[in-house]
Each structure stands twice: as structure tokens, then as C-alpha cells.
Amino acid sequence: MVDFPRFSSVLKTESKLQIKRPGKSIEDNFDWQEDIISKIREWAFNSKINSLEAFRSFDKDFDGLISKQDMISSLQEYCLIKPEDLTQVRMDRLFRLLSFYKTETI
């Protein structure tokens, strides 16, 4: 799950190097995911909303959590990400960065 405090802390980071990465280092990278986090941050800034309002916007079913489906829908709507760019692997990795409990929701 990604809870509000974790979502908020990621949005408030000023450098992608400040985002704590899960587990051991791996051969590939999280550049796409970090770019998406930057796009979310930019959208919130341009929309003049705080991290709580951004979280609520992404929580499409208003259950207090952002599911992968909520995230996919929101990225398409707010950040204009193409559906073909939102692959399962990319979304899994995004949730690995955002989810404190490493589950299917934020």
C-alpha cells in the first residue's frame, strides 16, 4: 500500500537521489519511474494543489489508497501518459518506489 505520508514525502523531495530505493541495487534503473514522479510533482505544482489534494485526486474510488488502476487512470488523465507506456513492469516498479508496505496499493 502507499499511504498518504509516503506519497507526500516522495512528492516533496527535490532530487530524485533523495528517494529511498527498495532493497539491493539492481543492474537496471528506475529512470522512467523517477520521471513519472517528477511529472506528478509538476502537475501538482502547476495545479496549485498540495500533496493531500493530489493524493485525493489520484484516489479515484475514495478508499484512502491509490491502487494500480487508480494510478494508471490518473497518470493518463493528469500527466497525459500514453496507455502503452504504462506497462505492468513499469507500474510494478513505480509501486516499489512509492509503496511503504510493498503491496498493490499506495
Image: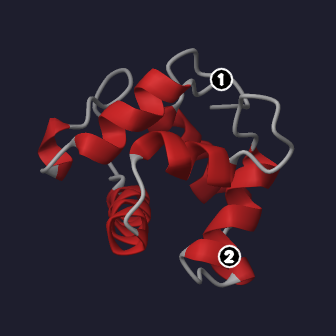
Q: Secondary structure at mark 2?
A: helix
Asked whether the viewer can see residue 4, the reply is yes
Relative to 94, 39 lies left or right: left
Specify the quadrant that holds the N terminus. Answer: top right
Pick whichever, 53 or 79, lies toward us. 53
Instruction: Using the image, determine if residue 44 lies above or below residue 30.
Output: below
At horizontal 25% and vertical 42% (from top left) the residue drawn is 12
Marks 2,1: beta carbons within 8 A: no
Instruction: Using the image, determine if residue 5 lies above or below residue 12.
Output: above
Look at mark 2 in the image and give the residue it sits on.
76
Give the image location of residue 79, x and y in percent. 53, 76
Look at mark 1 in the image and give the residue it sits on.
1
Relative to 83, 19 lies left or right: left
Estimate how packed mark 1 is, as few (under 14), some (14 to 19) or many (20 or more) residues with alpha carbons within 10 Å: some
At horizontal 13% and vertical 50% (from top left) the residue drawn is 15
At horizontal 39% and vertical 69% (from top left) the residue drawn is 39
At horizontal 59% and vertical 21% (from top left) the residue drawn is 102
Give the image location of residue 43, x and y in percent. 42, 70
Give the image location of residue 53, x and y in percent. 53, 48
- Residue furthest out toward the top: 101
Q: For residue 78, which numbered disc appears in the image?
A: none
Give the image location of residue 38, x and y in percent. 32, 63
Specify the quadrant that holds the C terminus. Answer: top right
Question: What kind of residue is marked 1?
Answer: Met
Question: What kind of residue is marked 2?
Answer: Gln
Instruction: Using the image, determine if residue 5 lies above or below residue 26.
Output: above
Q: Secondary structure at mark 1?
A: loop
Q: Earlier in the sequence, mark 2 or mark 1?
A: 1
Q: Give the CA distance from mark 2 to mark 1.
A: 21 Å
